[in-house]
Image (cartoon, helix red, strand yellow):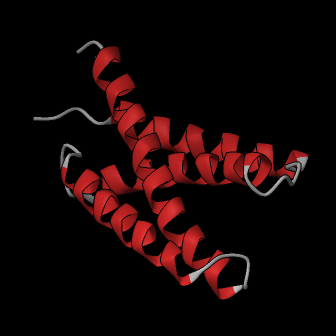
Amino acid sequence: MPIDLPFHARMLGLFFVTAIAELLGCYLPLLWLSGRGSAWLLLPAALSLVVFVWLLTLHPAASGRVYASYGAVYIATALAWLAVVDGVKPLWTDYLGVGLALLGAACIGLGHRPG
């Protein structure tokens, strides 16, 4: 059975958007708790977490396999967030870890044959 690349590309995009919603929903309260933002940040944070939960319902199945693959994309997105939002340059070990996580996700996602 051939690999459905358009399907996997869509899932990768959905995983990325889901990770952004999760990160934003956790980052905004951190700004408030650390005194770098007002309590009003809790409103968009809550909305972002609602979007995150809604996005999870769009994944093809609520299974360990799907969430394990999402976890790898989350790791990659979180390290990109570290660089872009926090201004911290990732280390070579960060890149290695992301590569290993994404390789693992590829093995999980591409190796599964529905049936």
Image point 33% across, 27% down: which residue?
A: 10
Nearer to us in this view, 104 or 12 = 12
Nearer to us in this view, 110 or 17 = 17
Q: Can residue 60 be seen at all in this image of the molecule?
A: yes
In the drawing, does residue 41 fall left or right of residue 49?
right
Image coords of residue 39 (percent x, y): 54, 83
**How many numbered discs sit on the rendered protein?**
0
Image coords of residue 23 (percent x, y): 53, 61
Image point 52% across, 45% down: which residue?
A: 73
Image coords of residue 29 (percent x, y): 56, 78
The picture quadrant where one finds residue 31 is: bottom right
4 over 22 or under it: above or below: above
Q: Can residue 3 be seen at all in this image of the molecule?
A: no
Picture quarter with the C terminus = top left
Residue at the limit of the structure toward the top, as seen here: 2
Picture quarter with the N terminus = top left
In the drawing, does residue 41 fall left or right of residue 83?
left
Image coords of residue 57 (percent x, y): 19, 54
72 over 28 or under it: above or below: above
Image point 78% across, 43% down: which residue?
A: 95
73 over 56 or under it: above or below: above
In the drawing, does residue 83 fall left or right of residue 22?
right
Nearer to us in this view, 74 or 42 = 42
Residue at the limit of the structure toward the left, as seen here: 115
